[in-house]
Amino acid sequence: MNASPVPNTRVYVSRHLRFGWWSILGFLTLGIVLEAMHGFKVGWYLDVSNETRRLMWTLAHAHGTLLGLLNVAFALTCYVLGEKSSGWRRIASPCLLVASLLLPAGFFLGGIIVYSGDPGRGILLVPPAALLLLCAVVLIAFGVSRHARQLPEQE
């Protein structure tokens, strides 16, 4: 029984560049919508009773944008390291992608229905997403530390 082959560098670079830039666009758009609701004084968003919603959606926007940038950085890291990075990135890549979906989704869904100042059940997506993100970053940091020393010196 053969194990599935490890995707080459081009696959990781392409996947994470596309995902990262589309995420940045989506969460930048969310930020503009939030600013518009602020500017038009939408009570459903700005009233004191909706402070939790405002916080959750701001966190969704901020985390989503940051994770989009992190995906772009991961793609560039894979590009720079090339095939040397094949082992650790096989696990880091899906962890980063799933965390990039679940973390902002958890914050956003947690803000749709708020219970007496507490976020909705969507917030339950945040802890596992945070663990996946931590796993991805640890793997990336160790992989970069191990393989970056082998890169040729540039003059």
Image (cartoon, rainbow, N blue to C red):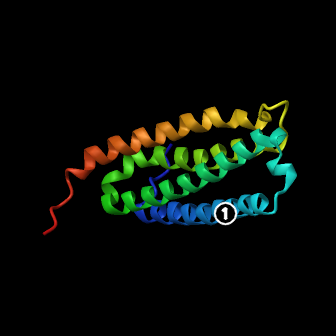
Q: Is residue 129 left or right of residue 1?
A: right
Residue bearing mark 1: 26
Q: Which of the 4 image quarters holds residue 140?
A: top left
Q: Nearer the viewer, residue 92 or 61?
A: 61
- SS at mark 1? helix
Q: Nearer the viewer, residue 113 or 34?
A: 34
- Percent position of residue 129, x then y: 60, 38
Q: Nearer the viewer, residue 93 or 2?
A: 93
For the point 71% across and 33% down, which residue is it?
124
Q: Residues within 10 Å of mark 1 (few under 14, many from 20)?
A: some
Q: Nearer the viewer, residue 1 or 125?
A: 125
Residue type, mark 1 in image: Gly
Q: Is residue 70 left or right of residue 88?
A: right
138, above or below 24, in the image: above
- Percent position of residue 54, x then y: 74, 46
Q: Is residue 119 left or right of residue 27?
A: right
- Percent position of residue 59, x then y: 64, 46
For the point 48% across and 63% down, which residue is it?
11
13, above or below 43, in the image: below
Instruction: State the quadrant of the C terminus.
Output: bottom left
- Percent position of residue 62, x then y: 60, 51
Taking the view exactly as shown, the residue that stands out farthest to the left is 155
